[in-house]
Image (cartoon, rainbow, N blue to C red):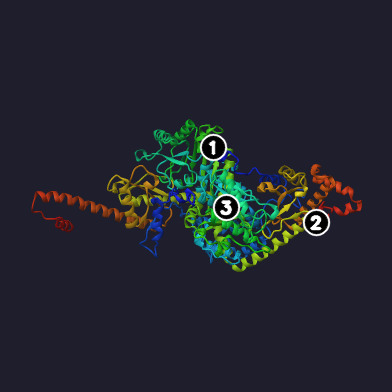
């Protein structure tokens, strides 16, 4: 008998992946403009650090919100005691209004259907506990957020079966990919309970098209399974096409109050839009009252601090502020993304065209020594250790094609981004010149074999030639 | 369609413990607005020392405003989601925990894992130590929430260790052995014992003998000990508190890898009265447990905003020292008020020195020595007397007739009202031949008034209809 549980001693927490290992390397040698200018620049962390000044300024103008006061009166005792898993009503109301605002007010949400949790990490796991048994499966389009391997599977015992998406159609979900994934699950004797999508996508940075969403609705209707739409990046959509929420699609197809309506669940969080991952504010939204009831009880295992609920209910109720924040935040994200894209272009690197998120999905296939994941790892290690940029390799996101990397842009200053792009450009340049010299070496050897006398232009080649002999 | 977890009721929330709260919510007592409402005596909250915490916060506005030395630390905190926790908070917590144990033990912040409340800490520990279908032993009576926290999502079983009033509900070697045998008969592999010390609902601290029995047993069976010490800061009377860590330091009980199998759960919800802030923790000397629990804490991290405020408060040693002393004083006073008030009604409590409640012996009011009679009595007390107290059956007590009655979540005045209602009820019970006669509280009040001389009636009721003048 093991002393500890299997969960504690296995490594199905998924944290041995390169996604997390890259962070560890960064921690050992973190870049700092002044103290460590040759350190590793963190480009593997999807955080939004661009709009703190707006939050800080609101906080400074509204000290009561953090000071446990309402209309000048102390409500400390009330908050200190408030552990009701139904959540602070004022906060839930403000949160659903904010969610609606992000969706252009094309849909509305009922605060009675929302369950607060300690971050989206907790929300996703809780939904798994509510919808699936140990050994059941959820289908996830690849590439997907590496954390899901821990969040959805570790303690729940649920399996993930990938829906393979490829660059041939910009990684969009197709009907055949869905069917193939479903059949693969069946071949493995896994009962499929649902599909989980991230929209906007992490790591792609794209919003799903209406066609994709329609496809999903048709699929889950046909198979009678659930759909979880992780919409934590919904507030980071900075350019067209506009964000279309799954709820909007259901509404437009008059599917409200049908069975499929009750099988669609949304996960949200304030970690990406407002840049507040430390405050642990996540939510599950569901139209199924049994899911809401069960998830509410389960939220006991990860309630949001009442102190934080109160602060954010005040902030999100300030509609003037939320309007201004959403607009400015979008502008800054768009600008920063453009800078990254332009910087990459200068290094002859392209990325998937994106309109959302805090990262770009970057195409480095042409830099691989071979079209394999080994070559991708080789390239990744060079970029982390030699170029000193922590970017995330596509394999850690379960991408089916090697050579794609997720590169974050919203967690650093403009200067740092500029430096990162310079480093990348130099790196690509050095590979190119190595390639050129390697190519010329091959050419010259051929010529040398045919002609004895040949004046060589590269000293290095001359040296190598001497060695080979 | 949904999981069995979502559609069954093994979340354990259909017990009277929780149902009583619901009834209270529909008709809550308020001295001014609803004086005949139900008084909540089923909620183990410490509301006696808020003024102290509030006063500290008022004197430290920078902390609440997320400033440090005049500079905003908002950004740093907003981004801080490291599951290793804010180092400043962990350093303060281990010192605070040591202080609560008279500094007889020391804790290493590296062995501390933060969690969103003890609820999260307990579940996480079970996920780390026990596989689905295996079991842990729990002495009865135990906190009803454990049926949800330890079993629901983990798939683990609880096998009770029966304790009896004959020896003050103390854990005995034979009770432990008996529980272990029962588990074996049910084909359940026992992975550990979970104790709550000080005990909820008993309000007592474990004796050294009990702790030694436990440790001897755990060594013999090669199992874990989880010591839920959430009430360790509420010990207001002698004997002092002996933590499992202190007991395990006894050289006579040495065992090479015992230290790897002892784990503590703690929280700031009871001592500091801050359940809303969700600050719990696991302490373990087992590196693998600390590592796994740390990763699992991702599912219930403590808000960085809260970590910051509390690390500052705990760092103020003068304030904390003053708080601990004063808090204990107030708890003791309130508890003595409850005990003596109950005694005046002929009701005794288990002698206690800790916690936010008393374990009350109402066996003599049962119409029969059964749990059905206990439930009947509970309903009468809830609906007719207007007090939400928690019946022993919901704590898996093996003997009917015991109730947990909380005292730290109300004012002096409210406690007086509650005691008066109990006194009246017991009187009615004596006159009326048991609780067969279901008389409503209001009706009984008018009955009592008819029995009293008319000039007394005038004195009894003030112009606001306040009943507090009644003896």
Give me the chain letter of mark 2: B
Q: Which mark is residue B2?
A: 1
- Dot 1: within a 10 Å radius of its alpha carbon, few (fewer than 14), some, or many (20 or more) residues? some
Of mark 3 and mark 2, the one earlier in the sequence is 3
Q: Same chain, marks 3 and 1?
A: yes
The residue mark sitting in front, 3 or 2, is: 3
Of mark 1 and mark 2, the one earlier in the sequence is 1
Q: Secondary structure at mark 3?
A: strand
Question: Residue A180 or B18: which is nearer the viewer?
Answer: B18
Give me the chain letter of mark 3: B
In the rendered image, the residue lying farthest to the top is: A222
Residue A446 place in picture, x, y as percent: 13, 48
Residue A280 place in picture, x, y as percent: 53, 52
Answer whether labels 3 and 2 touch (C-beta < 8 Å): no
Q: Secondary structure at mark 1?
A: loop
**Residue A315 showing in the rendered view:** no
**How far apart, in angstroms, are the residues tagged by discs 3 and 2?**
38 Å
Answer whether labels 3 and 1 touch (C-beta < 8 Å): no
């Amino acid at each position: 008998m093991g002393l500890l549980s299997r969960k504690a001693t296995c490594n199905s927490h998924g944290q041995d992946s390169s996604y997390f290992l890259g962070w560890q390397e960064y921690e050992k040698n973190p870049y700092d403009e002044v103290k460590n200018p040759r350190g590793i620049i963190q480009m593997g962390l999807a955080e939004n650090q661009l709009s703190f000044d707006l939050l800080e300024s609101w906080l400074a103008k509204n000290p009561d919100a953090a000071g446990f006061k309402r209309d000048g009166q102390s409500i400390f005792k009330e908050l200190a005691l408030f552990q009701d898993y139904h959540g602070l009503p004022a906060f839930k109301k403000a949160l659903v209004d904010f969610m609606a605002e992000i969706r252009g007010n094309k849909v509305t949400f009922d605060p009675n259907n929302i369950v607060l949790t300690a971050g989206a990490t907790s929300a996703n796991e809780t939904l798994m506990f509510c919808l699936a048994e140990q050994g059941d499966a959820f289908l996830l389009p690849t590439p997907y957020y590496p954390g899901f391997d821990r969040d959805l599977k570790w303690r729940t015992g649920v399996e993930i079966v990938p829906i393979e998406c490829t660059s041939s159609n910009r990684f969009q979900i197709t009907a055949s990919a869905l069917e193939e994934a479903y059949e693969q699950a069946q071949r493995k004797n896994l009962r499929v309970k649902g599909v989980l999508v991230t929209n906007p996508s992490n790591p792609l940075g794209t919003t799903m098209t209406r066609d994709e969403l329609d496809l999903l609705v048709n699929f889950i209707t046909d198979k009678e399974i659930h759909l979880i739409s992780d919409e934590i990046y919904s507030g980071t959509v900075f350019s067209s096409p506009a964000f279309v929420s799954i709820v909007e699609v259901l509404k437009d197809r008059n599917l409200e109050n049908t069975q499929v309506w009750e099988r669609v669940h949304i996960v949200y969080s304030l970690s990406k839009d407002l840049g507040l991952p430390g405050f642990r504010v996540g939510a599950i939204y569901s139209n199924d009252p049994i899911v809401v009831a069960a998830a509410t009880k389960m939220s006991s295992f990860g309630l949001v601090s009442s102190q934080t609920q109160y602060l954010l209910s005040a902030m999100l109720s300030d509609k003037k502020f939320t309007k201004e924040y959403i607009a400015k935040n979008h502008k800054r994200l768009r600008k920063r993304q453009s800078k990254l894209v332009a910087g990459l272009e200068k290094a002859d690197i392209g990325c998937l065209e994106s309109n959302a998120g805090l990262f770009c999905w970057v195409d480095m296939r042409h830099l691989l020594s071979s079209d394999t994941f080994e070559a991708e790892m080789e390239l990744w290690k060079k970029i982390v250790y030699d170029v000193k940029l922590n970017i995330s390799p596509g394999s850690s996101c379960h991408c089916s094609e090697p050579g794609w990397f997720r590169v974050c842009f919203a967690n650093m200053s403009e200067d740092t981004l500029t430096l990162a792009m310079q480093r990348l450009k130099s790196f690509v340049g050095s590979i190119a010149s190595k390639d050129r010299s390697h190519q010329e070496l091959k050419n010259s050897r051929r010529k040398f074999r045919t002609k004895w006398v040949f004046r060589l232009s590269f000293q290095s080649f001359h040296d190598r030639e001497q060695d080979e002999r | 369609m949904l999981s069995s977890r979502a559609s069954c009721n093994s979340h354990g929330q259909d017990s009277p413990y929780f149902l009583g709260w619901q009834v209270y919510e529909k008709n809550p007592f308020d001295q001014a607005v609803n004086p005949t409402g139900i008084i909540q005596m089923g909620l183990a909250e410490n509301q006696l020392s808020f003024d102290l915490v509030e006063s500290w916060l008022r004197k430290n506005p920078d902390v609440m405003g997320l400033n440090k030395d005049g500079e905003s630390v908002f950004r740093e905190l907003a981004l801080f989601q490291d599951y290793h926790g804010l180092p400043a908070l962990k350093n303060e917590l281990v010192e605070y925990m040591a202080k609560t144990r008279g500094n007889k033990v020391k804790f290493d912040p590296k062995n501390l894992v933060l969690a969103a409340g003890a609820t999260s800490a307990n579940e996480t520990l079970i996920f780390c130590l026990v596989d689905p279908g295996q079991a842990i032993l729990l002495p009865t009576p135990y906190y009803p929430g454990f049926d949800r926290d330890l079993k629901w999502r983990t798939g683990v079983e609880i096998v009770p260790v029966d304790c009896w009033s004959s020896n003050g509900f103390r854990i005995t070697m034979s009770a432990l052995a008996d529980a272990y045998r029962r588990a074996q008969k049910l084909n359940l592999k026992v992975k550990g014992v979970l104790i709550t010390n000080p005990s909820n609902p008993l309000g007592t601290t474990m004796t050294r003998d009990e702790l030694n029995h436990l440790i001897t047993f755990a060594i013999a069976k090669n199992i874990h000990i989880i010591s839920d010490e959430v009430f360790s800061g509420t010990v207001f009377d002698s004997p002092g508190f002996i933590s499992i860590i202190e007991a395990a330091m006894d050289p006579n009980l040495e065992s090479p890898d015992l230290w790897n199998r002892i784990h503590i759960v703690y929280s700031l919800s009871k001592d500091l009265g801050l359940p809303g802030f969700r600050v719990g923790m696991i302490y373990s000397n087992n590196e693998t447990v600390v590592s796994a629990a740390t990763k699992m804490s991702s599912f219930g991290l403590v808000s960085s905003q809260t970590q910051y405020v509390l690390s500052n408060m705990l760092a103020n040693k003068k304030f904390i020292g003053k708080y601990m002393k004063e808090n204990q004083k107030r708890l003791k006073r309130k508890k003595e008020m409850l005990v003596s008030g109950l005694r005046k009604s002929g009701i005794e409590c288990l002698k206690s020195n800790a916690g936010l409640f008393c374990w009350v012996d109402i066996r003599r009011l049962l119409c029969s020595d059964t749990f059905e009679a206990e439930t009947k009595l509970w309903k009468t007390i809830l609906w007719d007397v207007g007090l939400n107290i928690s019946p022993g059956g919901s704590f898996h007590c093996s003997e009917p007739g015991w109730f947990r009655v909380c005292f730290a979540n109300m004012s002096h005045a409210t406690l007086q009202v509650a005691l008066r209602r109990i006194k009246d009820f017991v009187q009615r019970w004596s006159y009326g031949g048991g609780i067969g006669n279901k008389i409503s509280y209001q009706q009984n009040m008018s009955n009592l008034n008819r029995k009293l001389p008319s000039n007394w009636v005038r004195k009894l009721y003030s112009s606001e209809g306040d009943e507090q003048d009644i003896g």
